[in-house]
Image: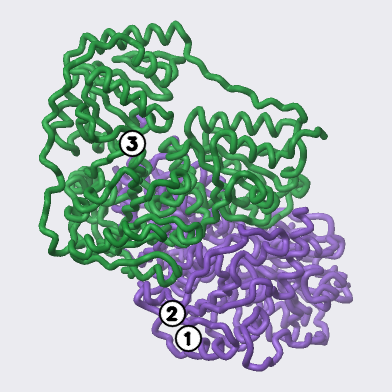
Chain colours: A green, B purple
């Protein structure tokens, strides 16, 4: 065997070099050796209550910092993060799943070792469906090259990858003089030039060019470039729901959130009426496009993402998203006068600080509460749709799973977000139903001394579903969420039934930066935001 | 289209005919139409907090009643039960997974509908790895036959199956005169006779025949037959850890739990010293066989399971487990004198009712607490290994995931067990680490008015792992578990630090049958049962 570093050490080193500083997970005997190594490394281990929490935390961490890591044991740990990995895949979040496994030497003769499902490669097969690259490090000669390949894919495609680590290889040494291969992907220069020529001509000839910006700009670190493009050209810019925080909302060129017929009419008119719509990193998903009420004409569009570049009805291969955007920045684009965007009446008007809490006055108060250090993490439900109208101040401040829409992301997500961005303070918006899935990760919040402010939209169940089809299955049991600090021996709890109580609780939560706060905000069962009403009417039509 | 019942109605009817009375799950828009139908059917819908809880509850329900059902939405629900389905597969529990899905009509052109991961069949591919049969009901002409096929496989192999239900087919009608196909599997009569002849001769010639009984006897409803065989022959009978409750432990022929060198020496000697070991439905797993310290000589064994029949070194095809066992019951087996089994000194001696609680006095008190109506549900950890020595009174009274060993089974498992067996009262033994994964399903316990007694073995972390490799990753945050009733507005909580407090709490819990009780039993961090010590020494040797 060779005399290089151990496979465990090389993996840790590569994760660190690529920007990871934390690893989320729960140990188990098949991964204990690697945990031991992790504990003595430059990476910090963060233990959650359940593996699901680790998966969500790592996803949020990846969205904020650029690389998330989950480390769990074989099957009983790994299969618990199947859903969170699927979310990372669907929404392009670069998460590395590291799973322990029975030793290569133990697998001979296929014995029934504990945690095994069907065959030893069952978990691998499952994760092949949920990741963009997967490997089992069962050969020290190739292990380093495999680690390089898989981690490269994670960052190139901004999607999760799977690394299985049989427990008897962690301490084996790999090749002595391995040099991490540089994977450099380049655009074909001729195609790039041709695509830019066409795009620039189309843009300069247009009367009403508009930019539609989405979350891939954030994933590939291109937000500054977007701002430069907007400032250079004065083109009006809209964002999608998923891309909400990709540009700060105070720019005079900012139109608002585009959601087809579900969103604000002025934004819809501007976007759909454009004779040259420049779609940058847009996810063509149902919720993002207003449940397919979007009327976007490809014949008048430039559509650039990490996977595809289309102009009108044809597409160009081998053009990197980044190169195309940088090309636009360098090109001679005709500067327009600063658009006059009719600012809508503020969604959140001053309302009297009295009376019971409801969706609208809650969102209004939260909007006033945001500052430059807030990261808003919205779970699924009216905490997301209602929050769509919050005014985002700084560019990384809104995290949500607005496409995959898996309930329970927000509380564990806050752990990952704050670990990745320790100076910010997460504001978690979560429904009572979603909280009951993963909210007890507050124990992890307490354990690591984090201080998010959790606002539970307590409206007695799954209120997104009620307008589609209601029944007892949409109810949830009522928890006294504000009493959880007594169970956890940490945090502050507030029962909020009126706007006055809300103001008091928010102030107290802001003032106490030492620990987390949880606000149990009572909302009438049938109170829904206007955005939610529009959404559920559309969805209901599909159920019959 | 045909004029038979709707696909949704037929599915519900078949589940009911095969014995299901409850369905566990959480709704989502892709499955709301079917939920609506379920609510108006003979089946009762049980909503859990998280899909994981539904998966574990249905598994326990299946183990007790013979068929469990989970119903969840597409991907964000389905992938959350990947792990619980894997457990059901590994431990042979007949669970039907029903997942909603986008309508067949919506899937045309492969749009990015919410909850989709990679392709529309991603979830199907995942579940093919975790089930013994899977189908998508996308064609009304074949839907009924597919339902028959898949449900038959579930009961034939006692393993989970997957049914995907696109939302636009729920109300479509299937063939008008469909007759459920009878799948009857029969042994080949000649082979069956030959195998029985050989077995009977081998048994009758043996000096020390011994039966080793495991959990498949329970899965296939053969416990009464086992008892008959034991009474008819007077052969000594041992059970494995997984098969612990397959026979009541008061029979004079009962030897105890066999776990290789890890178990009691007298049992090991009797089993390994037998010149004709009749292994019935035995799982050949590492934990079950004392981490491979079992010394079982195939040359002196008859090994019968649902998948295989071997006698000495050869095997017989096409012999059903049930037919073989019934054949033995009918055969002329030489009756032996009642064995004189040297009853071991009781594991649980009377100890003074004072002093701090520890593993040993806790298990002792729990042993005295059991009665004929208790179902013990043990999670993984010392709550399982310590509980191995509890005396089981009635035959279905011990549920555990002793092979797949997924933490977090016990609390949601109690929901399923009590729904399946409403007259019994679950006694849940769960570690603090496992409770933090799924224990908040106590909300579901409260919602449906169940009354399990939950005993939290609070030993400050993952104590199974500490002897193998210790570090901060084995710690968990300390919850005041006994305060959870205040959060849930139901149940009774007890903080237990001494044997005196334990006795008081157990009595109070027994007396209050109206609601659940939760005992937060403080155990020293390094206190381990003798069985756990033996296990972890063995496991540690494999980690290096």
Please rate how many residues cluster around mark 2, counting C-alpha atoms within 10 Å: few if below 14, some from 14 to 19, many from 20.
many
Quadrant containing the N terminus of chain B is top left
For marks 1 and 2 on the same chain, the one whose residue lies earlier in the sequence: 1
Q: Are marks 1 and 2 on the same chain?
A: yes
Distance from disc 3 to disc 2, alpha carbons, whole Å, reads: 48 Å
Image coordinates for residue B222, horizontal then vertical, percent: 62, 71
Q: Which residue is mark 1?
A: B509
Left or right? Give the position of A478 relative to B315: left
Q: Which residue is mark 2?
A: B516
Please rate how many residues cluster around mark 1, counting C-alpha atoms within 10 Å: few if below 14, some from 14 to 19, many from 20.
many
Residue A237 visible in the snapshot: yes
The chain carrying label 1 is B
Q: Which mark is residue A395?
A: 3
Image coordinates for residue A235, horizontal then vertical, percent: 22, 21
Image coordinates for residue B424, horizontal then vertical, percent: 49, 81
Front residue (pair B149, A136): A136
Image coordinates for residue A275, horizontal then vertical, percent: 19, 17
The chain carrying label 2 is B
The chain carrying label 3 is A
Question: Please, what secondary structure does the residue beneath circle 2 have?
Answer: loop
Please tell me in which quadrant of the rendered image residue B184 appears.
bottom right
Who's the residue at 70% across and 34% down the image? A143
Distance from disc 1 to disc 2, alpha carbons, whole Å, reads: 8 Å
Above or below, B199 against B138 in this view is below
Residue B146 visible in the snapshot: no
Who's the residue at 40% across and 7% down the image? A193
Q: Are marks 1 and 3 on the same chain?
A: no
Question: Please, what secondary structure does the residue beneath circle 1 have?
Answer: helix
Please rate how many residues cluster around mark 3, counting C-alpha atoms within 10 Å: few if below 14, some from 14 to 19, many from 20.
some
Give the foreground label among 3 and 2: 3
Distance from disc 1 to disc 3, alpha carbons, whole Å, reads: 54 Å
């Amino acid at each position: 065997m060779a005399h290089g570093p151990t496979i465990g050490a090389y993996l840790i080193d590569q994760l660190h070099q690529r920007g990871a500083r934390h690893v989320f997970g729960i140990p188990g005997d098949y991964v204990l050796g690697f945990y031991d190594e992790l504990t003595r490394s430059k990476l910090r281990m963060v233990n959650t209550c359940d593996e699901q929490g680790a998966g969500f935390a790592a996803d949020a961490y990846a969205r904020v910092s650029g690389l998330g890591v989950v480390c769990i044991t074989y099957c009983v740990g790994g299969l618990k993060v199947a859903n969170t990995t699927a979310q990372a895949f669907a929404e392009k979040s670069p998460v590395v799943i590291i799973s322990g496994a029975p030793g290569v030497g133990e697998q001979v003769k296929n014995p029934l070792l504990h945690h095994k499902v069907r065959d030893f490669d069952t978990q691998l097969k499952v994760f092949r469906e949920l990741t963009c690259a997967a490997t089992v490090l069962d050969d020290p000669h190739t292990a380093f090259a495999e680690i390089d390949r898989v981690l490269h894919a994670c960052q190139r495609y901004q999607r999760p990858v799977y690394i299985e680590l049989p427990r008897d290889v962690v301490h084996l040494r790999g090749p002595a003089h391995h040099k991490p291969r540089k994977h450099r992907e380049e655009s074909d220069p001729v195609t790039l030039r041709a695509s830019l020529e066409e795009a620039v001509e189309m843009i300069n000839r247009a009367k009403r060019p508009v930019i539609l910006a989405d979350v891939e700009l954030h994933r590939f670190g291109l937000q500054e470039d977007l701002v430069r493009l907007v400032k250079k050209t004065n083109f009006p810019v809209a964002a999608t729901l998923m891309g909400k925080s990709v540009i700060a909302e105070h720019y005079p060129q900012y139109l608002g959130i585009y959601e087809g017929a579900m969103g604000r009419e002025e934004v819809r008119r501007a976007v759909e009426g454009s004779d040259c719509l420049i779609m940058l990193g847009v996810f063509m998903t149902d919720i993002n496009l207003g449940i397919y009420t979007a009327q976007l004409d490809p014949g008048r569009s430039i559509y650039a993402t990490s996977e595809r570049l289309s102009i009108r009805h044809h597409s160009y291969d081998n053009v990197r998203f980044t190169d195309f955007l940088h090309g636009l920045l360098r090109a001679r684009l005709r500067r327009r006068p600063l658009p006059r965007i009719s600012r809508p009446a503020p969604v959140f008007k001053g309302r009297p600080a009295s009376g019971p809490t409801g969706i609208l006055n809650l969102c209004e108060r939260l909007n006033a509460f945001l500052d430059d250090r807030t990261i808003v993490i919205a779970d699924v439900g009216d905490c997301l749709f209602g929050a769509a109208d919050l005014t985002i101040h700084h560019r990384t401040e809104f995290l949500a799973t607005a496409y995959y829409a898996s309930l329970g992301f927000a509380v564990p997500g806050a752990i990952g977000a704050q670990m990745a961005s320790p100076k910010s303070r997460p504001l978690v918006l979560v429904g009572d139903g979603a909280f009951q899935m993963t909210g007890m990760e507050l124990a992890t919040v307490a354990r690591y001394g984090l201080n998010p402010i959790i606002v539970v939209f307590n409206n007695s169940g799954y209120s997104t579903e009620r307008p589609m089809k209601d029944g007892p299955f949409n109810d949830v049991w009522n928890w006294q969420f504000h009493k959880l600090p007594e169970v956890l021996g940490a945090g502050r709890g507030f029962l909020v039934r009126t706007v006055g109580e809300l103001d008091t609780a928010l102030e107290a939560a802001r003032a106490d930066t030492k620990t987390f706060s949880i606000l149990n905000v009572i909302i009438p069962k049938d109170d829904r935001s206007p955005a939610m009403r529009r959404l559920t009417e559309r969805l209901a039509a599909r159920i019959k």
